[in-house]
Image (tube, rainbow, N blue to C red):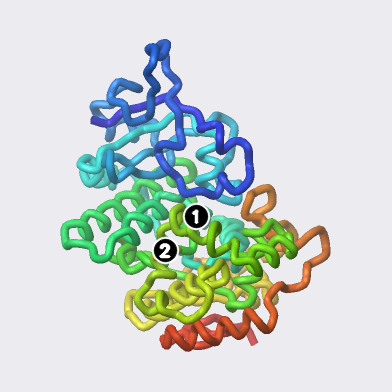
Amino acid sequence: MARLLTVRCSSNFLKGGQDTSRASRLSDFVPVQNTPTLPGRSYSVFHADTGESVPDPIKYLKEHGAKFIVYSLDFDQRVLGLVKVQEGIDIRKAPFLYQAQRENAEELLLLPFSALPEVAEALTGTQSMVQNMFLYNTGRCGSTLMCKAMDVLNDVQAVSEPDVFHVIIEHVCARDVLTSDEREEIIMLLRCSVFLLNFCFQQQDPSKTVICYKFRSEVIFIADLLQKATPEAKTIFMYRDLPGFLDSCLNLVFNGSYWRYLFDTTFRLDVLFRVPTLKIESPFFKFSVEHPRMITCPVTHGVHFVFVTFWIMQMQKAFDLTQEDSGIQVCLTFNQLLEHKERMVLKVLQKLDVDVPSDFDSSKIREIFGVDSQKGSAMQSERRKGNKIRSSWVGSWERNLFSTVLGHFNGDVDKPDFIMPSTMAID
């Protein structure tokens, strides 16, 4: 049975900092009870006696769907949650959708997995045809900026990081092999999640016929399943060279403090503390560093190794997808985007058959490049302060590590500045 709950964000996320970048969970919310809590008992959103039943979720979504957006799901409870935020808050303007949803949540609609196909099917006639684009990326490569730049076009809604996909990738990475039934369920959840996201956003603005979802970087690992779920979607992969990627990751992890970075890595405190924590909190890091082609690599398995292997695994997955007919269609580099700005954005869109009016004012896109796309979030780059950019932390030691790990991996991605097939360029 579907249920509707009045909720608020758990207080630990309202303090700011790295906690806000944690993957979305339905347990991020605390029910707001209409009656006093019984002595000795606490409530969660999963208690059957919280909230009110919604006997006809299809009718409810037809009437209220414009106010709800898919947030996350729970495989143990087998429910998907959609969130309504407080009035007057435009969460699409935030750098990351899921963070704004979490912080401003007011109501939570829970739909059981068993009801999702029927709900999606019944809502098919309530929306016009939507063209989906999926923006995959390595992370730390300007993908949030690209997302905001595309959103300027009249026909395009670009949404940064709906996080339901992150939970699905964690579920997949925690398993060595998916059974055929698990695989089919994952594809069903992906299809219904995309459909319900489309439904919610089109209810808000029917004129936007192209919806681009920019994912967290690890979603590339389930891109083939997403393509099975939504074969009509157009796909972009955005990436950055390994030195730039690692430098940005290290600056973020160590809050811009080179001395903290040097101290932790010199005394291997990262091996003892940071790496185990990363592997527990983010199963995809465990997936990459403990991959059969990585786990025997003869280097210190510290924080450098975590991010280097993560980049390699993502790049290799993207390369594999470029070799498939239904895989990645367009690749784009961080440097090309920064150099060519609106020209590159428009060329990518035109390559994917998005209609750009001949009289479109491209200066609207260029204006986006004058603002930090992640400003105000915990993921904002620590390398840039005002108009100054700090020097890179990647030196000869790190570059020697690149060579060792890439050589040990022995894959198609064989150098730190590897160029992906189908990479867009402007002469």
Mark 2, Cα crowd under 10 Å, few <14 / some 14-19 / many 20+, is: many
Q: In this view, does 288 lie above or below 26?
A: below
> What is the quadrant of residue 402 in the picture?
bottom right
- The residue depicted at 68 percent of the width and 48 percent of the height is 376
Q: Is residue 295 above or below residue 120?
A: below
Element at badge 1? helix
Asked if the residue at tag 1 contacts the one at tag 2, i.e. Cβ–Cβ closer than 8 Å, the answer is: no
Is residue 349 visible in the rendered structure shown here? no
**Looking at this rendering, what residue extends furthest in the front direction?**
267
The x, y position of residue 371, in whole percent, is 73, 57
- The residue depicted at 35 percent of the width and 46 percent of the height is 196
- Name the side, left or right, on which 338 lies relative to 65: right
Mark 2 to mark 1 CA distance (whole Å):
10 Å
Judge by depth and name the residue closer to the eye, 131 or 386: 386
Residue type (three-letter) at the residue carrying disc 1: Thr
Q: Name the residue under label 1.
A: 277
Q: Mark 2 points at which residue?
A: 286
- Name the side, left or right, on which 407 lies relative to 140: left
- The residue depicted at 22 percent of the width and 46 percent of the height is 117
- Name the side, left or right, on which 318 lies relative to 260: left
Judge by depth and name the residue closer to the eye, 267 or 231: 267
Q: In this view, does 158 lie above or below 333?
A: above
Judge by depth and name the residue closer to the eye, 317 or 233: 317
Quarter of the figure with the C terminus:
bottom right
Element at badge 2? helix
Mark 1, Cα crowd under 10 Å, few <14 / some 14-19 / many 20+, is: few
Quarter of the figure with the N terminus:
top left
